[in-house]
Image (cartoon, coloured by chain):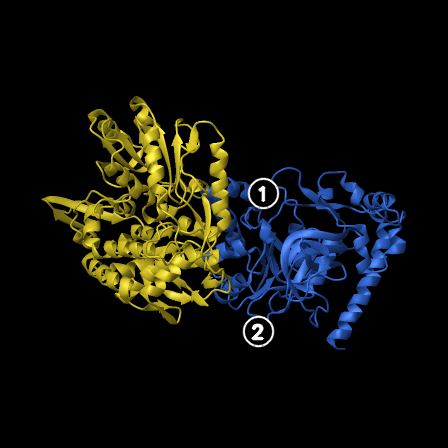
Chain colours: A yellow, B blue
């Protein structure tokens, strides 16, 4: 069986404690993953300042070059995997095998990571708003006749990562060219991508000390969050709750991304339906940037019915089908549990399901949840503002007067309206992390615009500087 | 004598011990009110029906809920009614904790355990640091007795695990860390101030925390008796290779109901597996099918821990613990069944708070 080791500042370590992750289709063990004990992580992280010094010997521009090289290695090289090698094709099949994401979508996600690596200069430009990156090498500099100085606030970036979609790993990649070593805790079903990215960087010549990779349990993850000066944490409400008030930890919780339509003439046009369908279903509907709500001020029921008809066309397909668009569930019990939860909530007045047929589908040895559209007359209904990791969307109608105040915390909002007051209110609300004005899918990212927090601001602080 | 003969002899001795203990606890002259009252509800006399360990199942499974609340004296055998009585508590993060009485059991258990310690790792006459749960726990007095039994003095640090469990439950990470640092700094003070402290009792987490601050070898520690929570092979390896190389590291498994199980002497061929042997005949661990506790699992198979405690102070027949393990073969030092890879029952692993120790 394939084994994924721990990386202790780049040094591979085989633990006596392992977990076996099975192929979701065959049920056969696919990979054995070494598990780091909490104390081992704690001991290793004491050396983080040394690892940062090692990485600091490389300039940002050198690390940018290495990112571009790493993009090639990541997408096409046979990279080390505990004594053997892993090809790009192996990687795609393995990610699909343990996460249930169709191979076609795994490939798309691979392209997303490749894009971040190749365009890292543009990404950093967006994160730093055009900072002369040499300033990070020298500590200070003059740009546009102004003296600028930035100090790094941490010796590492810890990342407690999810299993839902490989593309999410593009979020922590910029830390490396920003000269911050990585301490990665992969999701249980998706150790593949962070490990392969690390190997691609190492192949490109980045010091191995910059990569610590600790598959671990809950106490181990807490140790990372506790000891790393800066971290990002992915997870649901209960996972992130203890850390929400810790400024060292950037929380990536539920997205509850939305499309907001306030346009009386064209709410039901084909153009907008295409936009909604893509926002809801792209990448299997698994990402936090997928829309889980469509909030409208008029014609909600009509939009919901049209959307149900369109989304119903997306049928589960085998994971290796080139047009597969829905992910299988690694744990079928979870699929059934979520479906039951939706059914229970539907018994409460104020919401109706508009998609027909069985929600849970067994196909080719896998369990799927088919796209689900809910028409919510009551914006307070429990299904009105929730999200699940499959194409699930609630269409909610609210009066325009209450639209902005009622949407709640929203990671990405795409607003379609010509009403200046609504736009102004949306620009002013702190509820939205990323605001798209116009027909831009919620899942469409821009290299130069961070979609969830700003990693540079998380890692660095501008300080006053004078030289006599 | 070969292992088979040793095992048979141990079994014979166990059956004789069971008869003695059952006779003691169900005799009106010596038994405790709880078991005498319990016997009144039976349609047989345990003293006549129970001829050995296998017959204990006729008493059913001991329920630890019986230990919650008073009157605690119902557990005191009449024969010990005029002796000084200790009470030790277990668990108790919320609600009324479970408690058991003791007269000398904890001292006897640790005197027996002392025989398994090497004089090189735990030099007689050297002092100890007890860095573990204190308060109403048995460990606090037991480790102190162990130190005294070996001719040493025991230094103590206050540690309230129930408070730590509350901090964990409510996600108070910073407060938990502050409390841990408070405990560790006191331990460091003891180590710095008292040169003759050469032996340490501590828990896995506190050992890790202590090792972050100090080289225990340089501080003069020669032996570490580690317990209080579960340990797996990976931790065992990590401790021996990285935390405390060169120090005699002795993992143990103990609890308030049983006493102390000792670890199989370190053998590299075990690949750091931790294999415990109960202090038979004072206590017996049997691994049983979780769905059918009457069925013992085979060697190497996983089973739920069923504990039987057989001392004149305390009788616990067939108690189903919250732990599971693999059944291990007898060895010459311990010619009875052991348990390997002891851990919380799989079905409980998600729900139990694991605190600072």
Residue B329 circle label: none
Between A273 and B78, which is closer to the camera in this rendering?
A273
Horizontal side of A223 relative to B147 (left or right) equals left
Between B23 and B203, which is closer to the camera in this rendering?
B23
Q: Is there one chain holding both mark 2 and mark 1?
A: yes
Q: Pinpoint residue B169: horizontal percent, then vertical percent.
A: 52, 41
- SS for dot 2: helix
Whether residue A41 is visible here, answered yes or no, is yes
Q: Pinpoint residue A222: horizontal percent, then vertical percent.
A: 44, 49
Name the residue rendered at 84%, 50% in the picture.
B25
Name the residue rendered at 27%, 32% in the picture.
A268
Q: Pinpoint residue A454: horizontal percent, then vertical percent.
A: 27, 44
- SS for dot 1: helix
In this figure, what is the number of numbered marks? Answer: 2
Between B292 and B57, which is closer to the camera in this rendering?
B292
Q: Tell me if mark 1 has few (under 14), some (14-19) or many (20+) residues whose alpha carbon lies within 10 angstroms of its own.
A: some
- Which of the 4 image quarters holds residue B87? top right
- Position of residue B180 relative to residue B329, above or below, is above
Residue furthest toward the bottom?
Answer: B1
Q: Which residue is mark 1?
A: B162
- Chain designation of label 1: B
- Position of residue A225 relative to residue A403, above or below, is below
- Position of residue A290 relative to residue B260, above or below, is above
Q: Earlier in the sequence, mark 2 or mark 1?
A: 1
- Given contact means CB atoms under 8 Å apart, are the residues at marks 2 and 1 in contact? no
Whether residue A452 is visible here, answered yes or no, is no
Q: CA distance from mark 2 to mark 1?
A: 38 Å
Q: Pinpoint residue B108: horizontal percent, then vertical percent.
A: 74, 57
- Chain designation of label 2: B
Q: Which residue is mark 2?
A: B269
């Amino acid at each position: 069986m394939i084994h994924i080791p721990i990386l202790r500042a780049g040094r591979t370590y085989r633990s006596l404690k392992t977990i076996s992750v099975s192929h979701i289709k065959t049920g056969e063990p696919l990979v054995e993953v070494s598990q780091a004990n909490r104390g081992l992580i704690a001991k290793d992280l004491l050396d983080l300042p040394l690892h940062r010094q090692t990485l600091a010997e490389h300039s940002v521009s050198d690390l940018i070059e290495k990112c571009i090289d790493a993009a090639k290695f990541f997408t096409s090289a046979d990279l080390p995997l505990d004594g053997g090698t892993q090809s790009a094709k192996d990687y795609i099949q393995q990610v699909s095998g343990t996460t249930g994401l169709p191979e076609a979508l795994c490939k798309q996600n691979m392209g997303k990571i490749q894009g971040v690596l190749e365009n890292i200069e543009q990404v950093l430009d967006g994160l730093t708003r055009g900072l002369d990156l040499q300033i990070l090498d020298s500590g200070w500099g003059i740009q546009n006749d102004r003296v600028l100085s930035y100090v790094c606030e941490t010796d590492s970036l810890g990342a407690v990562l999810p299993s839902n979609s490989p593309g999410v790993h593009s979020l922590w990649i910029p830390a490396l060219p920003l000269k911050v070593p990585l301490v990665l805790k992969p999701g249980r079903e998706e150790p593949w991508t962070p490990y392969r990215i690390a190997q691609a960087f190492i192949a490109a010549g980045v010091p191995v000390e910059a990569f610590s990779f600790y598959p671990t349990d809950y106490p181990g993850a807490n140790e990372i969050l506790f000891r790393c000066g800066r971290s990002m944490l992915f997870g649901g409400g209960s996972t992130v709750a203890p850390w929400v008030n810790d400024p060292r930890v950037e929380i990536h919780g539920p997205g509850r991304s939305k499309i907001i339509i306030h346009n009386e003439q064209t709410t039901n046009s084909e153009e907008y339906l295409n936009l909604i369908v893509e926002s809801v279903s792209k990448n299997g509907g698994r990402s936090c940037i997928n829309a889980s709500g469509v909030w409208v001020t008029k014609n909600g029921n009509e939009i919901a019915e049209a959307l149900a008809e369109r989304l119903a066309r997306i049928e589960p397909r085998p994971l290796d089908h080139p047009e597969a668009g829905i992910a299988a569930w690694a744990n079928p019990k979870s699929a059934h549990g979520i479906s039951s939860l939706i059914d229970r909530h539907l018994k409460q007045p104020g919401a109706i399901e508009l998609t027909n047929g069985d929600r849970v589908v067994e196909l080719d040895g896998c369990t799927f949840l088919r796209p689900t559209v809910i028409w919510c007359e009551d914006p307070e209904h429990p299904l009105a503002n929730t999200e699940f990791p499959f194409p699930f969307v609630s269409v909610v109608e609210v009066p325009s007067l209450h639209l902005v105040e009622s949407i709640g915390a929203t990671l990405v909002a795409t607003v379609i309206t010509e009403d200046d007051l609504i736009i102004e209110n949306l620009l002013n609300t702190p509820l939205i992390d990323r605001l798209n004005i116009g027909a831009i899918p919620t899942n469409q990212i821009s290299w130069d615009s961070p979609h969830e927090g700003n990693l540079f601001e998380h890692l660095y602080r501008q300080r006053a500087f004078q030289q006599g | 004598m070969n292992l088979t003969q040793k095992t048979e002899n141990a079994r014979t001795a166990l059956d004789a011990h069971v008869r003695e203990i059952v006779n003691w606890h169900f005799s009106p002259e010596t038994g405790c009110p709880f078991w005498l009252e319990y016997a009144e509800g039976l349609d047989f006399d345990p003293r006549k029906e129970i001829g050995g360990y296998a017959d204990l199942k006729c008493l059913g499974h001991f329920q630890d809920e019986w230990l919650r609340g008073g009157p605690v004296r119902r557990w005191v055998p009449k024969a010990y009614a005029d002796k000084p009585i200790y009470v030790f508590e277990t668990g108790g993060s919320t609600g009324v904790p479970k408690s058991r009485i003791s007269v000398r059991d904890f001292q006897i258990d640790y005197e027996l355990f002392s025989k398994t310690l090497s004089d090189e790792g735990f030099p007689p006459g050297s002092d100890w640091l007890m860095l573990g749960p204190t308060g109403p726990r048995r460990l606090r007095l037991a480790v102190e007795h162990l130190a005294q039994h070996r001719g040493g003095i025991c230094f103590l640090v206050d540690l309230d695990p129930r408070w730590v469990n509350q901090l964990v439950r409510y996600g108070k990470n910073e407060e938990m860390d502050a409390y841990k640092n408070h405990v560790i700094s006191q331990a460091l003070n003891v180590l710095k101030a008292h040169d003759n402290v050469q032996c340490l009792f501590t828990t896995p987490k506190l050992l890790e925390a202590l090792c972050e601050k100090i080289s225990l070898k340089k501080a003069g520690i020669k032996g570490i008796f580690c317990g209080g929570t579960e340990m797996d092979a990976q931790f065992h390896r990590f401790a021996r290779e990285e935390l405390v190389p060169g120090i005699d590291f002795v993992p143990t498994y103990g609890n308030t109901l049983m006493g102390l199980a000792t670890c199989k002497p370190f053998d590299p061929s075990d690949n750091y597996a931790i294999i415990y042997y109960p202090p038979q005949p004072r206590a017996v661990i049997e691994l049983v099918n979780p769905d059918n506790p009457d069925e013992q699992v085979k060697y190497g198979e996983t089973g739920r821990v069923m504990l039987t405690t057989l001392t004149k102070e305390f009788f616990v027949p067939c108690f189903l613990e919250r732990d599971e393990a693999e059944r291990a073969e007898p060895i010459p030092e311990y010619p009875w069944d052991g348990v390997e890879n002891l851990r919380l029952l799989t079905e409980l692993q998600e729900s139990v708070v694991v605190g600072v120790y």
